[in-house]
Image (cartoon, grey):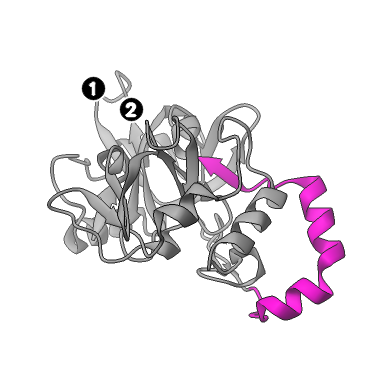
């Protein structure tokens, strides 16, 4: 099922032996457009410490009661690497997380290691055993740690980015639509504001031509007129297969999928 990210904020996170906190925001990588971590606000339990949790730890969620159950204990989470979530998360910190938890390194071909980039090309990554990677890629890990991870983005900080078509401004990022099984971002919600009388529309990451992360700007490979006439998104209704089909049919032959 497809769900909007804002609706998941505030969900309870439950370890195998008790509650640990609430969902605060999400990190996704901008290569495969997949959610990699949830930022969890632990409240009084860990003196307000925020921790990163991968969807790889999820057990079947309790959607009715808004609970994400984990296959982790409170003790595991309590002793997780201390990461300042107010700063960009570096690859070095991600490596520490993957060594502390039973998570595979997605950048080395772990869970959802390959994926669809913004141009629609499949990014393949070889599957290599973790123990081999640790022996053979220590130097690579060190270089990655120095460089940091330039592809990990915050949904909170990306919200509000300007959206431009090839021939003009169309709105701002208002939300993200994610598949609750694969945790891939299928669509970005665009709020057109007064531009199109408050109409909200969805665009696929596949239709993005360029992202300027320094200028907070996304450029689409389509026209203003095409965005204006696209099927309107109603946040109170689910994004079902029928709507997705109509949306893709509308943009067929209007977007260059290189």
Q: Quadrant of residue 211?
A: top right
Assess disc 1: are there few (<14), some (14-19) or many (≥20) residues with their C-alpha within 10 Å of its C-alpha: few
The quarter in which the N terminus is drawn is bottom left
The disc, 1 or 2, on the residue closer to the chain's N-terminal end is: 2
- Frontmost residue, 63 versus 233: 63
Residue under pointer 2: 192
Residue 85 image offset from top left, x and y in percent: 56, 35
User: Residue 55, labelled with which disc?
Assistant: none
Q: Quadrant of residue 11?
A: top left
Does the magenta-highlighted stretch encompass residue 74? no
Callout 1–callout 2 Cβ contact below 8 Å: yes
Residue under pointer 1: 197
Residue at position x 63%, y 80% from top? 127
Which residues are the magenta region?
A: 125-154
Assess disc 2: are there few (<14), some (14-19) or many (≥20) residues with their C-alpha within 10 Å of its C-alpha: many
Residue at position x 24%, y 60% from top? 61
- Frontmost residue, 42 versus 98: 42
Q: Kindly report the distance in space between the C-alpha atoms of the residues bearing marks 1 and 2.
A: 7 Å
């Amino acid at each position: 099922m497809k769900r909007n990210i804002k609706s998941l904020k505030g969900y309870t996170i439950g370890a195998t032996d008790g509650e640990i906190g609430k969902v605060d925001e999400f990190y996704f990588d901008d290569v495969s457009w997949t959610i990699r971590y949830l930022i969890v606000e632990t409240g009084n339990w860990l003196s307000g410490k925020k921790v990163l949790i991968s969807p790889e730890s999820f057990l079947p969620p309790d959607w009715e009661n808004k609970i994400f159950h984990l296959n982790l204990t409170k003790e595991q989470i309590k002793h997780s690497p201390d990461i300042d979530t107010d700063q960009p998360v570096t690859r070095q910190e991600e490596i520490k997380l993957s060594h502390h938890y039973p998570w595979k390194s997605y950048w080395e071909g772990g869970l959802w290691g390959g994926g669809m980039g913004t141009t629609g090309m499949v990014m393949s990554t070889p599957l290599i055993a973790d123990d081999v990677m640790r022996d053979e890629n220590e130097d690579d890990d060190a270089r990655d740690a120095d460089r940091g991870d330039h592809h990990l983005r915050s949904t909170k900080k990306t919200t509000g980015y300007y959206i431009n078509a090839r021939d003009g401004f169309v709105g701002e990022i208002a939300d993200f639509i994610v598949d609750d099984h694969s945790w891939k971002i299928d669509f970005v919600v665009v709020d057109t504001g007064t531009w199109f009388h408050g109409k909200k529309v969805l665009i696929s990451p596949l239709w993005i031509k360029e992202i300027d992360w320094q200028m907070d700007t996304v450029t689409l490979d389509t026209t203003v007129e095409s965005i204006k006439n696209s099927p309107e998104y109603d946040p109170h209704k689910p994004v079902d297969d029928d709507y997705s089909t109509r949306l893709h049919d509308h943009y067929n032959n209007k977007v260059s999928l290189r």
